[in-house]
Image (cartoon, rainbow, N blue to C red):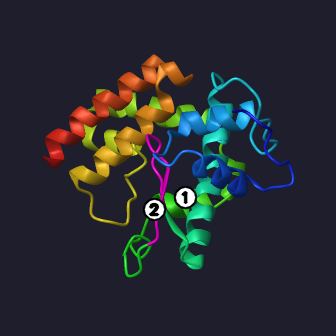
Amino acid sequence: MSHELNPTLDLAEQLLELLREAPDGCSEYLLIQQLKARHSTHIPHLALTDKLVLFRTHFLLFNALYQLRERLWNERTAHLLISPLCVQLQPYQAGSAALSEHDPLRDYYLDLQHLRDTSENDVEKLLTSFWKRMQGGDEKHAALELFELEESNEPLNLNIIKRRYRQLVSLHHPDRGGSTTRLQSINLAMEILERYYN
C-alpha cells in the first residue's frame, strides 16, 4: 500500500512509520524509494544518478535514522539496527551495550556540517586520491581513505572493514544509481584491506 506520509511528521517519524510496516527490516535503497513513492518532502526528489544528490539523500536518511535510534533508546521502546543493507526495528533490551560503544559513523551523520560542506568535487576527491595513491604504492592508506577509515579512533579489524565495505557497496551499486568505476574501486580496496587485516 502506498498511502502518503503525513507531511507534518519529521523524517525520523516517517521512517519509524515505514519500519513498523516492515518487521523484517528493509534496505536503505528501499527506504529511499518508499519515501519518494509516498511523497516525503524531507529528501530530494531527483535522480540518484547525480553523485551529490545520492550523497545528500543518503546523508539525510542516515542522520534521521541515528536521531531515531537515540530517541527510541532513550525511551527504552526499541533498538534500531542501522546498516545500508538492513534497517530494522528490534526489541529494546536493557543493559545492552549497543549505544555505549563509540561509533564514528553515528558522529559523522549527526554532524550536519558534513552535509553542508560536502560538494560533488569532494565526493569524487576520495576516488581520485585513491587511484593516485595506488599508483604510488601506498595501497593500504589509499584503501582506508576510500573507506573513510583512515582517521578512525577505534582499532580497525576485518569486521569493521567488512561492515564499511557493505555500506559502500550498497550506496554505490550501479543498480542503485551508483557508478561501476566507483564500485570497482571499492572492491579493489576491500581486497587490499583483507590482505592487511586478515
- Horizontal and vertical percent position of residue 189: 30, 34
- Horizontal and vertical percent position of residue 23: 50, 49
Query: Alpha-carbon neighbours of circle 2 within 10 Å: few (<14), some, or many (≥20)?
Result: few
Secondary structure type for disc 2: helix
Pick the front one: 150 or 180: 180
Q: Is 92 located above or below residue 190 in the figure?
A: below
Is residue 120 among what the camera can see? no
Q: Is 153 located above or below residue 27 in the figure?
A: below
Tell me which amino acid carries mark 1: Tyr
Q: Would you say residue 115 sits in the magenta stretch?
A: no
Labels 1 and 2 touching (C-beta < 8 A): yes
The outermost residue toward the right is 8
Which numbered circle lies on residue 108? 1
Residue linked to disc 2: 104
Side (left or right) of 192 relative to 151: left
Tell me which amino acid carries mark 2: Pro
Q: Which image quarter holds the N terminus?
A: top right
Q: Would you say residue 89 sits in the magenta stretch?
A: yes
The residue at the point 41 percent across, 25 percent down is 183
The quarter holding residue 74 reads: bottom right
Pick the front one: 35 or 49: 35
Q: Which residues are magenta?
A: 80-92
The outermost residue toward the front is 1
Pick the front one: 188 or 87: 87
Q: Is 118 located above or below residue 74 in the figure?
A: above
- Horizontal and vertical percent position of residue 39: 80, 35
